[in-house]
Amino acid sequence: MRHRTKIILIIALAIIACITAGMLYQFSGMKKTPEYSLDIIKTAVKQHDLTTFEKHFDLETFYSQAFDDVIAPTLQQPNTNGISDFLAGIMSGVKQNFVSSMVEQTKRYVETGSMDSDNKVPSQVLAKKFTALTDFYASTYKTVDHAKIEGNIAYLDVTVRQNQIDQDFKMQIKMRKLSDDTWSVVQITNIQQFLASLAKAKEAKLAELNLPIAKEIKTKLAIENSKFEHQKDSRYGASYAFLYKPSITFKAEKQVAEFVGQLTVYNKNSEKIFVQKFIIPGPFQKGSTINYNFSWPLNPFIPSEKELINSPDGDLKLKEEILFVRFTDGSELKLLENIPGTK
């Protein structure tokens, strides 16, 4: 009986050993997956572990590629098949400043959990704009939806949460295998599509937040009977302008001291192609209506303005807003410019 019990115990221990070995092997294998490396990055950010973060996130390569994908196309001269050696040299310097700025800003964020910076030198301008555009620091990695490994390169479909607007977005991440068989992030391959979706969602959220403020402003100040037209003056060569003629009625019981308006023009595909603000000082007589004539020059060498020049009036849609009103008693009404919590 004792012999039988001993055999059963040995078998049970053997089974446990096999299961444990299998679990250890599986865990070891999991540590080598791209998904596991993303979890390492997530933990490193939470624990402010810069060394681990830098191992699994190639900041130089990542921001160099982001510059090429997002920034460079906006800096290149339109209607050219290439870039001159002179311009290429300038672009190289701008790119290095951008990459260096973003790398330092990201390191500071990982170490401190804050993205505040006192560095306001001109080389930081593109970095600050890119930070505002992407809001990476306000996003949280959630899940990997799909992963594909091709040799030493992996492509992951990832869901991230944009916390300020409380909405999920899809991101395609490229990773490179390291010498210890873990992985490092090197690129977002769909960054242009990601940014377009993010910008559209942020604009919709901001419009939602501003809706009650805009309604109140309209009870004080109203844009009425507006007209617009293109103008071409060929007397001194081809020059173009966009003319906007609104009537503003001052409905408030309090006297308006000044106001700021904005005109946004969309093409037939509802894409924003032209934006102009107008700042009008007062004071203005209560109950009065004033007609205004605004004229803004258009540059046919700027793609969006060229599109505006060539678009028939019937294809254009205008959005007219009063962004800010200040009254003579010092009180104000103002639309939000950014979603609360956005740096």
Image (cartoon, grey):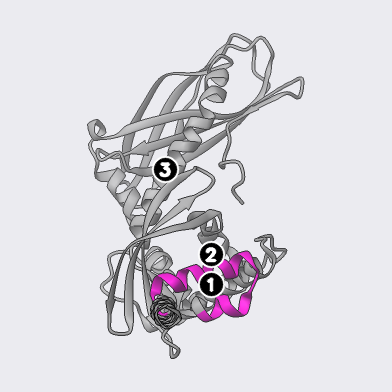
Q: Are marks 1 and 2 in contact (CB under 8 Å)?
A: yes
Residue 236 appears in the picture as rendered: no
Label 3 and label 2: CA atoms lie apart by 22 Å
Q: Given the image, on which type of amino acid does mark 1 rest?
A: Phe
Label 3 and label 1: CA atoms lie apart by 26 Å
Viewer-proximal residue, 330 or 151?
A: 151
Q: Given the image, on which type of amino acid does mark 3 rest?
A: Ala
Residue corresponding to mark 3: 201
For marks 3 and 1, the one nearer the N-term is 1
Q: Which residue is located at x 41 percent, y 48 percent?
A: 168
Task: Please tell me whether residue 52 belongs to the stretch shown in magenta.
Answer: yes
Q: Are marks 3 and 2 in contact (CB under 8 Å)?
A: no
Label 1 and label 2: CA atoms lie apart by 6 Å
Q: Are marks 3 and 1 in contact (CB under 8 Å)?
A: no
- Specify the quadrant of the image occupied by residue 200: top left
Residue 200 appears in the picture as rendered: yes
Residue corresponding to mark 2: 126
Is residue 248 positioned above or below 103 on the image?
above
The x, y position of residue 244, in whole percent, is: 41, 31
Regarding mark 1 in the picture, which secondary structure is present there?
helix
- Specify the quadrant of the image occupied by residue 232: top left
The x, y position of residue 68, in whole percent, is: 39, 72
Is residue 280 positioned above or below 342 on the image?
above
Q: Which residue is located at x 35 percent, y 29 percent?
A: 228
For marks 3 and 2, the one nearer the N-term is 2
Please state the extent of the stretch shown in magenta in the rendering.
Answer: 32-55
Task: Please tell me whether residue 8 belongs to the stretch shown in magenta.
Answer: no
